[in-house]
Amino acid sequence: MNYTDYARRIRAFESLGEVAEYGQVLEGGQPYPLLRFTLPGERWLVITSGFHGEEPAGPLTLAEHLPEVVAFARERRVGLRVYPCINPSGFEAGTRYNLSGEKPNNDFLRYEVAPGEWRGELTGAQDYLRWALFDGGPKETRAVRSDLARFAPPVAALDIHQDNYQSSALTYAYTFGDKGAYLPMMRAAERYATVIRSQKVDEHNVTDPDGFIEYHDGSVTDWYMRQGVPYTATLETSTHTPMDACHAVNMLWIRGFIDLASRR
């Protein structure tokens, strides 16, 4: 989808809340506005989406269903800060990274694993001395990280992704905190996509019997966990999952996270 059209769709929700530019990036000589939607509330949920451009389901779910999300959140007095498409040039081109080849995902924090030795992720139960907010990385990451850091940590944070490496309609999630809080969402999602249970998804990670992974990878989810956010997760559907099913799974988790935020 042309990002100009996508941004127009997001701006059309100005009657529902505030649509603001938190930054702008230049790719191929073209400016891309970075948009945030805000709905005030008593307890806050942050939704991020579109870090990877070949994972379109999250941005499209938000473009198509934001009025439903807002209505559900408003009923529960939950405030929203929604970053619907963090990597606009990648989204427009259908490429994982931005048009400069930079990797906008992760790069929110670094771990000092030994004096003076910093890493972006921890493997297994690796020990570390301390963590720190990172100040480098791709321009899209710097922009959204800077904007998020302006606000107090929310009650809940959901990052919506897709997995481009699986070969069928599948779903799983990276989570921190009480996994029992996420079980109803995962069980409901299995109506639309098979949950990957106790299986390897990449070189580092194997899902547990419920389809969850705990992985300190320097992502926005990891960063919010380190700040003490009670509910934080990265949702995955495979890119082989039909788009309608992706929307259904994404909305299940969005509503579930709104409910979790409303209980605190």
Image (tube, rainbow, N blue to C red):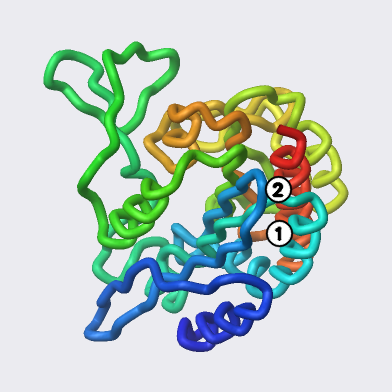
For the residues labelled 1 and 2, the Cα–Cα distance comes to 7 Å
Marks 1 & 2, CB-CB < 8 Å contact: yes
Q: Position of residue 132 (x, y in %)?
A: 27, 30
Q: Position of residue 131 (x, y in %)?
A: 30, 25
The residue lying at 32 percent from left, 73 percent from top is 24
Q: Amino acid at mark 2?
A: Leu
Q: Position of residue 195 (x, y in %)?
A: 75, 40
Q: Which image quarter: residue 197?
A: top right
Residue of label 1: 241
Label 1 SS: loop
Residue of label 2: 170
State the mark number for residue 55: none
Disc 1 packing (10 Å; few <14; some 14–19; many ≥20):
many
Which circle's residue, 1 or 2, is located before the other in the chain? Answer: 2
User: 137 or 55, which is in the foreground?
Assistant: 137
Q: Is residue 181 above or below residue 192?
A: above
The residue lying at 72 percent from left, 64 percent from top is 70
Q: Is residue 112 left or right of residue 173?
A: left
Q: Amino acid at mark 1?
A: Thr
User: 257 or 50, which is in the foreground?
Assistant: 257
Q: Position of residue 102 (x, y in %)?
A: 27, 59
Q: Is residue 251 above or below residue 234?
A: below
